Image (tube, rainbow, N blue to C red):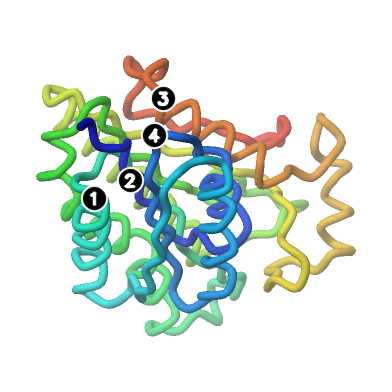
Amino acid sequence: MTRPRSILITGAASGIGAAIGRMLARSGTAILVHTRRNRDGADTVAAAIRQAGGQAEVFLADLSQPEAAGLTVAAAVEAFGGLDVVVSNAGFADRTPFADLTDTAMAASVDGIQGAFFRLARAAIPHLRAATDPRIVAVSSFVAHTFRTDVATFPASAAAKAGMEALVRALAVELGGQNITVNAVVPGFIRKDAGAHRAIDPAALQAQTAKIPLGRIGRPEDVAAAVAFLTSPAAGYITGQALHVNGGLAI
């Protein structure tokens, strides 16, 4: 019996991660819904995946802890018999100005974003080598590309996301001969779930709309659609790329 296409999505209890889980859900897929602590949100996403015909399990782990990535990958492999797709979405935004950043805060951003991706991909590689159409997709951010006086800056987050994109490109070269593609999706301004933490207040976010050629803030589903394409067989000749999903926001 053919096993389902096994997909690991980190930070999947809300927002972009949840939208990715819902979009990839269908018969023949099995998705590990990872979250750090939002069990209720993860359970809701898992229920939606099952309703769409897929399999789903929930796994809680703090990916800033060194052992957590390996445990998360192992949970997906144990639950579904293998691993075909890794979507590294978990992360956070820190808008602290450069001069006010502490060593601790800077290290937290780098380790929680760039470090988490590094450990997750490293743990997944042995399993992806045995997969069909194996994929790694990292969710980055416009903050690593857009540096203007009229757009909010996030120095720690920008450094961490830019470092993650560099790892994506390096890994794409290393894994190309094994037919494992590695790409990044780079969201622009994206709406948050109701009640979720916002690094930019709603009024300021609305003001940013004037800077977006398509005239609206993005939806989590816009990003999820890009991830769905990059994880599909149709994207088999695309690797080492950063696909911007930002409504035309200048970078």
Label 1: which secondary element: helix
Label 2 close to label 4 by CB (< 8 Å): no
Tell me which label, 3 or 4, sits earlier in the chain.
4
Q: CA distance from mark 2 to mark 3?
A: 12 Å
Q: CA distance from mark 3 to mark 1?
A: 18 Å
Q: CA distance from mark 2 to mark 4?
A: 16 Å
In the picture of the structure, the residue carrying the numbered disc 1 is: 121
In the picture of the structure, the residue carrying the numbered disc 3 is: 232
**Is 3 left, or right, of 223 in this rendering?**
left
82 versus 206 height, above or below: above
Label 4: which secondary element: loop
Task: Please name the residue shown 82% across and 40% down the image.
Answer: 211
**Is 51 left, or right, of 201 in this rendering?**
left
168 versus 32 height, above or below: above
Question: Label 1 amino acid?
Answer: Ala
Q: Nearer the viewer, residue 214 or 143?
A: 214
Q: CA distance from mark 3 to mark 4?
A: 13 Å
**Residue 86: mark:** 2
Label 3 close to label 1 by CB (< 8 Å): no
Question: Label 3 amino acid?
Answer: Ser
Work out whether residue 141 can be spotted. Answer: no
Tell me which label, 1 or 2, sits earlier in the chain.
2
Tell me which label, 4 or 1, sits earlier in the chain.
4
